[in-house]
Image (cartoon, rainbow, N blue to C red):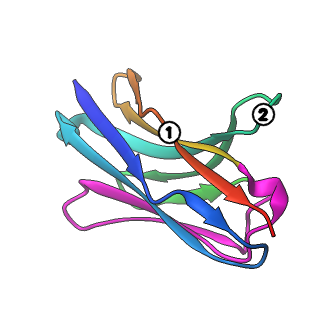
Amino acid sequence: QVQVVESGGGLVQPGGSLRLSCAASGSILYINVMRWYRQAPGKQRELVAGITSGGSTNYADAVKGRFTISRDNAKTTMYLQMNNLKPEDTAVYYCNAVWYSRREFWGTGTQVTVSS
């Protein structure tokens, strides 16, 4: 089992920045990839960014150039640095960890609200 806990959400003005964290514990050695998803009210959950165990990253077009995904050397914490935030970035952000066996683990989410 893997437990993932998100933190760092909050209220920020347009153009501002936030850094989300996802702390992973348990059987983390089996994690192949970790991802950030988000879900806005009335919309489907969507992939924001992902990072593999080898450090490769990918981003949704909507956040490219503004968001940066990273992970600490111990691979226990994943981050999402979000810059130049826009009102359309408002959503609950979820951390997702995927084992090599493709089993997935989800956090409970952290709210990000971008509003003036």
The kind of residue on which mark 2 rests is: Pro
Which residue is depicted at the point 73% across and 66% down? 64
From the viewer's perspective, tell me whether residue 99 is left or right of residue 50. left
Q: Which residues are magenta?
A: 61-90
Q: Quarter-wise, where is residue 106 in the image?
A: top left
**Residue 33's spot in the image, x, y percent?**
42, 43
The image quadrant where one finds the N terminus is: top left
Rounded to the nearest whole Å, what is the CA distance between mark 1 and mark 2? Answer: 13 Å
Q: Which residue is identified by label 1?
A: 109
From the viewer's perspective, tell me whether residue 107 is left or right of residue 28. right
Q: Residue furthest front?
A: 116
> Does residue 8 show up magenta in the picture?
no
The image quadrant where one finds the C terminus is: bottom right
For the residue pair 87 and 1, the one nearer the viewer reads as 87
Task: Say above or below: 51 vs 106.
Answer: below
Q: Quarter-wise, where is residue 63 in the image?
A: bottom right
Q: Which residue is identified by label 2?
A: 41
Regarding residue 109, the answer to whether it shows in the image is: yes
Regarding residue 61, the answer to whether it shows in the image is: no
For the residue pair 12 and 59, the one nearer the viewer reads as 12
What count of labels does the image hold? 2
